[in-house]
Image (cartoon, grey):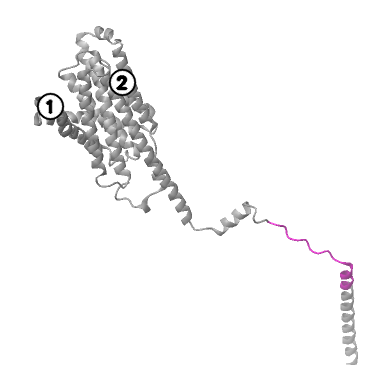
Amino acid sequence: MPPNVSYPDIRAEDLRRAARNRPGFWAASLITATLGILAGIAIFMGWLILPDAWIPAQFWPLVQILLALTPALIWLISFSIGNRTGNGMRRAVFLLWLVTAALYFVTVNPLTAHVFQLDVWLYTAWWSELLGRLLVIAPLELFFIYLVVRYGVYPTSAFHTLTDGAIYGAAAGLGVATALNLLSVFSPGFPDLSQGVLQSCEQALGYVALGALLGYFMGQERFRRTNTFYLASGLLLTVILHAMFFFTLNVIQANDIFLQSLDALIFAGVFAIILFAVIYWLLHRSRRAFRRMAALLEIREEANKPKSLLADVMQMVEAEQLEVRPSPPPPPSSPGNDHDDEDELESLKKSWEALIAEQEAGHDKL
């Protein structure tokens, strides 16, 4: 919840909208991870050796670029198909991926290559690689993802559910992965089709999960009254996971710990699936809390409404506590009453005749 929003300003429908789920996001992430693992199985079985031999040399640069773009395009297409809330969010996700990839070439890459000169000292020892990733690469890349999401979609109306943070974070993470894959294409290039598929999928799986985790913390910071250091703690946690994941990935690639050519991809896929499962569980708890608050607000609003007397009467009638009964019939007339009425009329007639006779007698005397 934004800090400038007070409780009287909150409406139940706003809470329910913020708690809305995005099934297309989870489906797209699962499809990307599954296809990546299936591609690794195809490489392990040797099914890509024949297509690799058929690719002409003049088309190899174009094929490498397509390999670098394929994981992100698979996720974007799957998300667009699964997301039925409108074209606005689809455009926002696509533009965020594109802008992140483009800006990486002019921001993070010059810093790592020319300012910190990672190529000179990063791979001289295992501890130098771990420290370089923990203190330089991970903070730069994740803070870059944070800035793109924070100033790209965070303050706009496109960011209006708890899950949107993870979605936009994943899109920005895929932008970083795409930029790194393209840098590998330009220098030194993929040695063959199998290595190109493996490297593109490993990078995409790692960055999409890490970006989604960072986006989750941003969504919590936007819609809930979190502690001042909540987002900073989330960023620090994501930095540590980033450094440990890619350090472990390089160790596995160098030693073939599990299965030759497939071990690193399996590790990346399992890491992404576990991280997405944790994010889903955390978001499920937050959405449930928001729905509960919405129900409490509706109960309070209903209790504060002035009661209507007519509404209470109608409610009692509907509950059959009040019955509309017909008026009682007049009592039947008895024979004695009819006789009394006749006597009264006869007496009145005699009095009237006596009065007339008295007036005529007085007139004769005069």
Which residue appears at 33% of the width and 36% of the height?
A: 164
Identify the image quadrant of the C terminus.
Answer: bottom right
Q: Which residue is mark 1?
A: 122
Q: List x then y, in percent, for residue 243.
A: 20, 30
Query: For the residue marked with disc 1, what is the amino acid?
Result: Leu
Helix, strand or loop for disc 2: helix
Residue 177, picture quadrant? top left
Which residue appears at 19% of the width and 32% of the height?
A: 138
Query: Range of the magenta residues?
Result: 324-341
Which residue appears at 62% of the width and 52% of the height?
A: 319
Which residue appears at 25% of the width and 47% of the height?
A: 228
Residue 245, picture quadrant? top left
Q: List x then y, in percent, for residue 126.
A: 15, 26
Helix, strand or loop for disc 1: loop
Residue furthest bottom in the image: 366
Query: For the residue marked with disc 2, what is the amino acid?
Result: Gly
Q: Cα distance, mark 1 to mark 2?
A: 28 Å
Q: Which residue is mark 2?
A: 36
